[in-house]
Image (cartoon, helix red, strand yellow):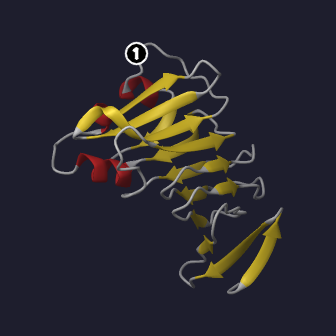
Amino acid sequence: GSGEHRVIDQFEVKVTDDGVGGEHKATGEGLLSIYAVDGDLVERGDGDDLIFDFGPDNDLSHIIQAGAGNDTINLGNTSNQNILVWEEGDANSSAGSPAVDTIIDFTAGKEGDALDLRGLLDDLAGDSGKSAVDLVSFALDGEGNTVINIAGAANPAQPVQQIVLQDVELNYTNGSYEELNQQILLITS
């Protein structure tokens, strides 16, 4: 409910209810821990957030909306489908210094967790006519992780957002958007 406070580890989290469709928004400063349950929408702040999604293992999707900053999201190894959303303004606009979000316990595959990049890609493509095929690629980091690179239309070779799927090593041939889209659920249009 409105004004409820929870202490998780050493970080205080203030949870407010906006009264619209049962959505809950968490606010705070510095590192922010969020407990997401029962298909609620969780919106992150603009700082470097630490998100824990250890909600119940049920048939409901958890929607976690990305924010600006370098975030770490632990999806909690449940059978729920998580939908991670990146929106306009979530990427770092500084060249050579991409925002880096790390996802722990991501489930790959077409029935697994989903990355919704529509808002971010619309923002980065602008009026250029470029699409996900032009702006999204991936690589393996040699440590068992997959790194998804998302670039802006002005410089498609320079990522402005990286999404690290920790302990997920996808099959790699050429690192193209098409190859990535065959292995994980991407929402790009």
- Using residue 136 as the reference point, say whether residue 184 is left or right of it: right
Image location (x, y in percent) of residue 52: 72, 55
Task: Give the vertical position of 4 relative to 184 (above or below).
Answer: below
Image location (x, y in percent) of residue 57: 77, 53
Between 151 and 106, the one lying in front of the other is 151
Q: In which quarter of the image is residue 104?
A: top right
Between 66 and 159, the one lying in front of the other is 159
Residue at 51% across, 63% down:
46
Between 35 and 58, the one lying in front of the other is 35
Count all numbered tags in the image, as a single digit. Answer: 1
Between 46 and 175, the one lying in front of the other is 46
Residue at 26% across, 39% down:
131
Which secondary structure lies at badge 1? Answer: loop
Q: In the rendered view of the protein, which quadrant contains the N terminus?
A: bottom right
Q: Residue furthest top?
A: 173
Q: Residues within 10 Å of mark 1 (few under 14, many from 20)?
A: few
Residue at 55% across, 65% down:
45
The residue pinned by badge 1 equals 174
Image location (x, y in percent) of residue 177: 37, 29
Task: Give the vertical position of 50 relative to 105 (above or below).
Answer: below
Q: Which amino acid does label 1 sit on?
A: Asn
Task: Give the vertical position of 42 relative to 173 (above or below).
Answer: below
Q: Quadrant of residue 23?
A: bottom right
Image location (x, y in percent) of residue 26: 63, 71
Residue at 24% across, 41% down:
153
